[in-house]
């Protein structure tokens, strides 16, 4: 199946609003409906024990492994 990739429109604010309006009209069938575009938030975890980091930890509080810089 061949489709249109809309990810390139999600970075520019003006294009982002256009896509929201178009998707809202497609989903609801009426003007003015605003679709909410969710963004995925990456979780940073320890490689050794899989501990979920909450902020700017340099070392894992569970096993003491140094956190990877990204």
Image (tube, rainbow, N blue to C red):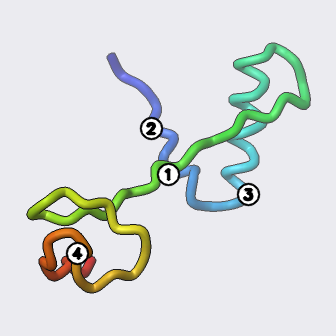
Q: Which residue is mark 3?
A: 14
In 3D space, how far apart are the residues under numbered discs 1 and 3 (Cα atoms)? 12 Å
**Residue shown at 90%/31% (left/top)?**
32
In 3D space, how far apart are the residues under numbered discs 3 and 4 (Cα atoms)? 41 Å
Looking at the rendered image, the disc whose residue lies closer to the viewer, 4 or 1, is 4
Labels 4 and 1: the sequence-earlier one: 1
Q: Are marks 1 and 2 in contact (CB under 8 Å)?
A: yes
Q: Can you say whether 56 is above or below 6 in the image?
A: below
Labels 4 and 2: the sequence-earlier one: 2
Q: Position of residue 47 (x, y in %)?
A: 13, 63
In 3D space, how far apart are the residues under numbered discs 4 and 2 (Cα atoms)? 38 Å
Looking at the rendered image, the disc whose residue lies closer to the viewer, 4 or 2, is 4
Q: Badge 2 local density, few (<14 within 10 Å), some, or many (20+)?
A: few
Looking at the rendered image, the disc whose residue lies closer to the viewer, 3 or 4, is 4
Q: Is residue 10 left or right of residue 15?
A: left
The N terminus - image quarter: top left
Query: Of 21 and 35, which appears nearest the observer?
Result: 35
């Amino acid at each position: 199946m061949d489709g249109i990739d809309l990810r390139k429109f999600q970075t520019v604010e003006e294009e982002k609003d256009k896509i929201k309006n178009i998707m809202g009209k497609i989903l609801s069938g009426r003007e003015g409906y605003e679709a909410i575009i969710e963004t995925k938030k990456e979780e940073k975890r320890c490689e050794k024990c899989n501990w979920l980091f909450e902020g700017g930890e340099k070392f894992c509080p569970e096993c003491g492994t140094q956190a990877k810089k990204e």
